[in-house]
C-alpha cells in the first residue's frame, strides 16, 4: 500500500503523511483508517479492481465501527490500459511543481516512500513503483475533481 495523505491549498498539494506498507489488508486497512482519523480527512479514494473492491469496503467498515464519517470511494479509472510508467510520466510535472513534501523530521515510512519516488526510472525495470504511481493517481484525482459547486433552488 502506498497512500499519500495530503491537503490542498490553492494549487499546492502538501503531502503531510503516508501509509507505505507491504503487509496484508488486515494490517494496512487499519493503518489507513488510523491516518484518516488522525488527519481528520473527509474524502479518500482507493485504487480498486473487481478483485480488490472488498479492500475499500474494509476501510469503510473500520471507520464506521469507530464512528468516523468519511467518503471512501473506489478509483477504477486507473485501469484504462495506460501503463504505470506512462501515468507517472504524464503527471510528473504536477508532482514536481505542485506537490510539497516534508523535509527534515519524517517517519521511517515517509522516508521509504520518498526513496521509492526518487528511485523510479522511466526507462528500464523498477522493482517497486507504488509510491510514484500513488502520486500520479493523486494528481489525476485532484485534476478530475470539480472546482466549483453551485447551489441552486430546486425546480420542483
Image: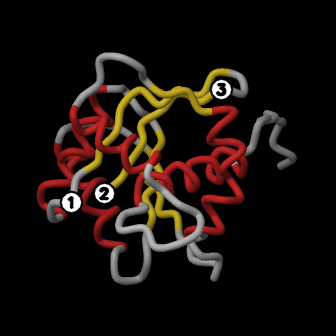
Compare marks 2 and 3 and give the one earlier in the sequence.
2
Which is more toward the observer, 3 or 103? Answer: 103
Q: Which residue is mark 1?
A: 22
Which residue is pictured at 57% across the width and 77% down the height? 79
Q: Which residue is mark 3?
A: 12
Compare marks 1 and 3 and give the one earlier in the sequence.
3
Asked if 16 appears above or below 47 in the picture, the reply is above
Element class at badge 3: strand
Residue 78 percent across, percent down from the top left: 57, 69
Which residue is pictured at 35% across the width and 68% down the height? 127
Report the disc number at residue 2. none
Q: In the displayed structure, does residue 18 sit left or right of residue 26?
A: right
State the quadrant of the N terminus: bottom left
Q: In the displayed structure, does residue 153 sit left or right of residue 49?
A: right
Corner quadrant of residue 4: top left
Label 1 environment density (alpha carbons within 10 Å; few <14, some 14–19, many ≥20)? few
Which residue is pictured at 41% across the width and 26% down the height? 16
Compare marks 2 and 1 and give the one earlier in the sequence.
2
For the residues labelled 2 and 1, say whether their Cβ atoms are less than 8 Å apart. yes
Element class at badge 2: loop
Which is more toward the observer, 106 or 25? Answer: 106
The residues bearing labels 2 and 3 have C-alpha atoms spaced at a distance of 24 Å
Corner quadrant of residue 87: bottom right
Which residue is pictured at 36% across the width and 73% down the height? 53
Amino acid at each position: 500500500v502506498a497512500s499519500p495523505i495530503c491537503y490542498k491549498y490553492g494549487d499546492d498539494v502538501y503531502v503531510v503523511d503516508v501509509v507505505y506498507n507491504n503487509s496484508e489488508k488486515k494490517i494496512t486497512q487499519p493503518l489507513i483508517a488510523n491516518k484518516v482519523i488522525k488527519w481528520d480527512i473527509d474524502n479518500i479514494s482507493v485504487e480498486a479492481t473487481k478483485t480488490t473492491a472488498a479492500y475499500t469496503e474494509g476501510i469503510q467498515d473500520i471507520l464506521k465501527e469507530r464512528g468516523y464519517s468519511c467518503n471512501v470511494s473506489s478509483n477504477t479509472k486507473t485501469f484504462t490500459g495506460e501503463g504505470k510508467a506512462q501515468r507517472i510520466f504524464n503527471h510528473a510535472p504536477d508532482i514536481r511543481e505542485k506537490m510539497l513534501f516534508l523535509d527534515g523530521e519524517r517517519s521511517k515510512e515517509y522516508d521509504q516512500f520518498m526513496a521509492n519516488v526518487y528511485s523510479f526510472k522511466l526507462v528500464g525495470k523498477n522493482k517497486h513503483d507504488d509510491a510514484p504511481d500513488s502520486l500520479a493517481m493523486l494528481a489525476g484525482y485532484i485534476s478530475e475533481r470539480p472546482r466549483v459547486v453551485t447551489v441552486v433552488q430546486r425546480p420542483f
